[in-house]
Image (cartoon, rainbow, N blue to C red):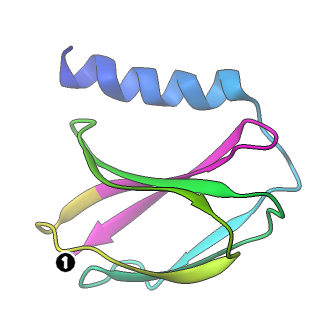
Amino acid sequence: MSPRFKILWLTLGAIFRGFNPNFSINVWPNPSNGSFNYRHDVSSPVSITVTDVAGKVVYRANEIQEQSGTLTLNIKPGIYLFSLLDGGHFSAVHKQIIIQ
């Protein structure tokens, strides 16, 4: 699968899963050195995935119960996609994050 196809697939996957207008996420600081705080307002368990620009998954965590936390990534500087999937409603929100 080519990198362009993976990025398109990720984008289309988010569209087909649907959008919950009451679903929000904050990720800060951005840019950072690899340590990010996050907060969302989903009451059901969520999954967090971080992918690089080629679509390679560099971090994944499932069934997260907490609505806030800190994520420390030991990865190369660059642009990444932070995705949070609300498993209860099959909605996803994506944020671009930058690691310096």
Label 1 belongs to which residue? 100
Q: Is residue 85 magenta?
A: yes
Q: Quadrant of the N terminus?
A: top left
- What is the three-letter code of the residue carrying label 1? Gln
Measuring from the top left, give residue 12's x and y in whole percent.
54, 22
On screen, residue 37 above or below 80: below
Q: Is residue 99 left or right of residue 84?
A: left
Quadrant location of residue 80? bottom left
Question: Could you tell me which residue is drawn at 80 percent across and 43 percent down?
Answer: 88
Considering the whole magenta stretch, tell me its main secondary structure.
strand
The front one of 57 and 10 is: 57
Closer to the camera, 75 or 95? 75
SS at mark 1 in the image: loop
Q: Residue furthest left?
A: 76
What residue is rendered at 65% in x and 56% in y?
A: 46
Q: Provide residue 23's location: percent of width, then percent of height.
A: 80, 56
Magenta run includes residue 18? no
Residue 39 drawn at (x, y percent): 65, 77
Image quadrant assignment for residue 96: bottom left
Q: Is residue 8 left or right of residue 65?
A: left
- Tell me the quadrant of the picture where the C terminus can be found: bottom left
**Residue 22 horizontal side relative to residue 49, left or right:** right
| Circle count | 1
Picture coordinates of residue 32, whole percent (x, y): 31, 83
**Which residues, given as a range, are shown in magenta?**
80-100
Residue at 19 percent of width and 62 percent of height: 78
Crowd rating for badge 1 (residues with CA inside 10 Å; few <14, some 14–19, many 20+): few
